[in-house]
Amino acid sequence: MSYREYKSPKRQEQERKEKRSRKSNNAGTILSAPDNTLLTVVTFLIIIGFLAIFSATAPKCMREGVNLASFLIKQIIYAVAGFFAMGFFAKFDYQKLEKYNTKFLWIVIILLVILQFTPLGVTINGAKRWINLGFMQLQPSELAKPLFCMLLASTFKNKVDLLSSKNWFEIYIPIIVILFLILKQPNLSMVIILGITSLCLYIAAKGPWQVLAALGSIMGAGILMFLPKLLHGYQMDRINVWLNPGSDALGKGYNIIQSLIAFASGGFSGTGYGGSIQKLAYLPECHTDFIFAIIAEEFGFLGCLFIIGLFVTLVYRGLRISKRCPDMYGKLLAIGITVIFGFQAFLNMSVASSLLPVTGVTLPFISYGGTSIIVSLAMVGILLNISKQRIKRIRTEANE
């Protein structure tokens, strides 16, 4: 053996350890195919949405003398744009999203300011939530969903520090400004969704519970003290009629009562596709906020159970993607997106069945809405990209 080939016993042992470490590494990251189950579930939800939107809006289109499929055609166009966004983000490395946090943050703030303080803002049913772009109405608050996930995942990935002055100036104060502008629309339901998502990300990142308890106590006391001033009159009315819908059956309790009639009419198996009576001008917003009630009427308990099962599967796949992701940023990003989908679906279905007061929240992927479906599919694309990277368990021989 030549001098160059000779290795000391210590060096040989070190190389064996390095080789064994590489092969027995329990956290080896590999690239895999995207989560096809997640993609299938989302596709099913969108197809169901197409069917439900056409059924719910056809009578309205007939009354207005327009194409019976006008709402459906628009939704299909929005969905196609959403699938393009999903395809882009499914291929875009999610770890590079952090670089765009600041730019995205300012875009959302500027859009919310334009909405509130310029004539471009559109008010519908007393809520100023949309910007008229001519070809569609943009809802800036929908963009806050992925923004919150990106900002907080980036902030919490290393260490959760709610007392850092840098984080307050760069992250927390801008988040508070966004929440204030959304609350001003008013859109309390979106603030609740973003708040629950933030809380789940904090818990997932194992933030100090002492700080959370202290801040939670202060915020809780403040909310209880100023709740009557924070809520608008119509929001207090919604809570009152939720507790007793019959107190104003033809007024503020009308939506809830008509939604419950739809559920009762559907029974176990439903009246059949297109057989809904409540969509005939009885149930307002039947293609957006109360589309789940129309599905319940036409497809019954079985149809509702199928929808719930799809959303449960979506949440399960999202949490599974988070668990198998090799880095903390991806884990938190996946959790945030999953919580948004799951909690928003829970809110919508709970409102439609009168388990919660009316909030004005749409059903993800199913309700009619351009910004909502485009942003939702873009977030699905991020989830699919995260799912490509997973932790692989590698077995090694003990004697190697």
Image (cartoon, rainbow, N blue to C red):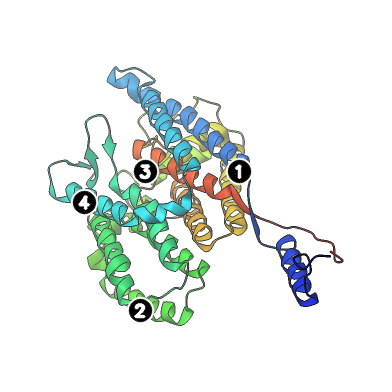
Rendered image: mark on residue 248: none
Rendered image: mark on residue 35: 1
Q: Quadrant of residue 173?
A: bottom left
Spot occupied by residue 192 in the image (x, y as percentages of width and height): 38, 59
Instruction: Give the residue displayed 33% in from the left and 22% down from the top.
Output: 61
Instruction: Give the residue displayed 37% in from the left and 34% down from the top.
Output: 282
Spot occupied by residue 373 in the image (x, y as percentages of width and height): 41, 38
Inspect the image, locate mark 1, and give the three-letter code of the amino acid beneath it: Asp
Which callout, 2 or 4, points at the residue further toward the start of the chain? 4
Callout 2: SS: loop
Which callout, 3 or 4, points at the residue further toward the start of the chain? 4
Spot occupied by residue 114 in the image (x, y as percentages of width and height): 17, 48
Q: Is residue 392 left or right of residue 118?
A: right
Inspect the image, locate mark 2, and give the three-letter code of the amino acid beneath it: Leu
Callout 3: SS: helix
Q: Nearer the viewer, mark 3 or mark 2?
A: 2
Q: Which residue is mark 3?
A: 255
Q: Which residue is mark 4?
A: 110
Picture quarter with the C terminus: bottom right
Inspect the image, locate mark 3, and give the three-letter code of the amino acid beneath it: Asn
* Separation of marks 3 and 4 at Cα, in angstroms: 34 Å
Which callout, 2 or 1, points at the residue further toward the start of the chain? 1
Q: Is residue 244 left or right of residue 331?
A: left
Q: Quadrant of residue 82?
A: top left
Q: Which residue is mark 2?
A: 163
Which callout, 1 or 4, points at the residue further toward the start of the chain? 1
